[in-house]
Image (spheres, grey):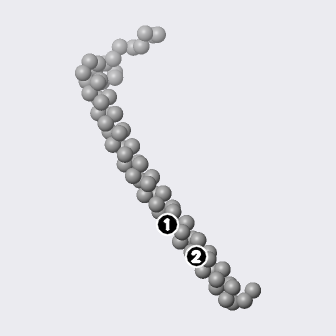
Amino acid sequence: MSELSRIEELETRVAFQEHSLNELSDALADARTEIARHEVVLRRVLEELKSARGSGASADPADEPPPPHY
């Protein structure tokens, strides 16, 4: 294997690794964006749950009556 072909092989590997790193970086950015959206939805659901518990039921689960099967 000549020195020139070895250099070309190394350049090809580096280019592939750079491409892979860019794809991973994009995937990570997408995942972080999705996590941020999920956090917003989860906060909304938790707030709705708190308001639903506060509007009719007791806010403290210990104050709730036992389930019917007891």
Q: Nearer the viewer, residue 65 or 31?
A: 31
Image quarter (top left, top right, bottom left or bottom right) of the C terminus: top left
Location of residue 49 in the rendering, given as x and y in whole percent from the top left corner: 32, 28
Residue 59 seen in this snapshot: no
Q: Is residue 29 left or right of residue 12?
A: left
Amino acid identity at mark 1? Asn
Residue at 37% across, 48% down: 36
Q: Earlier in the sequence, mark 1 or mark 2?
A: 2
Q: Is residue 2 left or right of residue 57?
A: right
Instruction: Measure the alpha-carbon separation of dots 1 and 2.
Output: 12 Å
Residue 25 seen in this snapshot: yes
Secondary element at tag 2: helix
Image quarter (top left, top right, bottom left or bottom right) of the N terminus: bottom right
Location of residue 32 in the rendering, given as x and y in whole percent from the top left corner: 41, 53
Q: Is residue 33 above or below residue 14?
A: above
Residue at 48% across, 57% down: 27
Residue at 33% across, 43% down: 40
Q: Is residue 18 left or right of residue 5?
A: left
Q: Is residue 2 above or below residue 59?
A: below
Q: Which mark is residue 10?
A: none
Give the residue number, with chain letter if any, for mark 2.
14
Give the residue number, with chain letter if any, for mark 1.
22
For the residue carrying disc 2, how many other residues have a C-alpha within 10 Å: few (<14), some (14-19), or many (20+)? Answer: few
Secondary element at tag 1: helix
Residue at 69% across, 85% down: 5
Amino acid identity at mark 2? Val
For the residue carrying disc 1, how many other residues have a C-alpha within 10 Å: few (<14), some (14-19), or many (20+)? Answer: few
Location of residue 2 in the rendering, given as x and y in whole percent from the top left corner: 72, 89
Quarter-wise, where is residue 58 in the image? Answer: top left
- Residue lying furthest bottom in this view? 3
